[in-house]
Image (cartoon, rainbow, N blue to C red):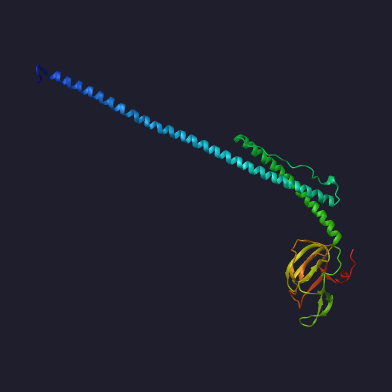
Amino acid sequence: MSLTLLYRGKNVRFSMRLNKLHWLSAVLVFALISGIVIHLIFSSGEQPTEQLDYLPISASLAQQTNDDSQATNKLVTLKKQQLTALTIKLAELQSQVLRLNALGERLADNANIPQQEFNFQQAPPSGGPSAVDGETIRKSFVQLLSEISSLEASLKHEENQLQMLESLNLGHHIENTRYLSGRPISKGWLSSYYGMRKDPFHGRPAMHKGIDFAGKEDGAIIATAAGVVSWADNRYGYGQLIEINHGDGLKTRYGHNKKLLVNVGDVVTKGQVIARMGSTGRSTGPHVHYEILHNNKQINPLKFVYRKAK
């Protein structure tokens, strides 16, 4: 098999006869050249794609780095704010300690306690570090926590001292004013005595374990000695009752009140208004039922009513 190539121009004629080997070789050469050209075209088209893929990755890394930097700055700012708030709180606590020191000194002076017994002169720990960076902030927090611990110990010590002073002052005060004397009212009259009497409700003889002072409703009921309130509530028969413990086994009771002005645990002074006169409980009209107990047994209050005050 052979292949004849014929070219005919205007002035030129050309013809070539190719056998089978020649034209097969020409086809293979043409195919090889075409493959190389196609490969080069596709290779040059892929390069921009690779570059385009690379650019977003670089931008993403840059954005992530920027976000991390902003988060770190926000964290540092937050720590600075917390440190500032903690420093201000520490300063407030230190001011309170100074005021407590001044109060303690006055109490000790009023109680005539030697100065060396209570030391209120020692200044509390102080400080206020300035935060600059993360490491400085960390050290500042450690320093503030240490100062707060020292301040806490100082407050506990001074609290104990003030409690002791309070007990001493209270003890001196009660000792001087717990002497029982006088009437439990500011205005009114003695309406019923201690001992056997005709019961106002059923008319039969009954033991009256106190004395009654009548007066106007809402009249002042006063403590006849200093002490601590051991009862301030309703009690059967007494109505609204106040009981005061004066120590040495002595107590006083004030019954049938309209309104109570003290609570259990309150420390009252001699002559203090503790209630308002009423007619609560087993009562026929506004009055106060006044009792004095010695070792929890009622005794005749009359001798204490007319007792001379110290």
The residue positioned 79% from the left and 66% from the top of the image is 273
Viewer-side residue, 157 vs 275: 275
Q: Relative to residue 210, is residue 20 drawn left or right? A: left
Q: Quadrant of the C terminus?
A: bottom right
User: Residue 101: x, y in percent?
Assistant: 77, 47
User: Residue 82: x, y in percent?
Assistant: 61, 42
Q: Relative to residue 19, is residue 33 drawn left or right? A: right
Residue 280 drawn above or below residue 55: below
For the image shown, how many numbered marks are present on the structure? 0
Residue 4 drawn above or below residue 83: above
User: Residue 54: x, y in percent?
Assistant: 39, 31
Q: Quadrant of the N terminus?
A: top left
Question: For the view shown, which residue lies furthest in the bottom direction?
Answer: 203
Q: Quadrant of residue 90?
A: top right
Q: Relative to residue 57, is residue 245 drawn left or right? A: right
Viewer-side residue, 51 vs 33: 51
Residue 219 drawn above or below residue 265: below
User: Residue 49: x, y in percent?
Assistant: 34, 31
Viewer-side residue, 46 vs 118: 46
Residue 64 drawn above or below residue 162: above
Question: For the view shown, which residue lies furthest in the front direction?
Answer: 10
Q: Quadrant of residue 190?
A: bottom right
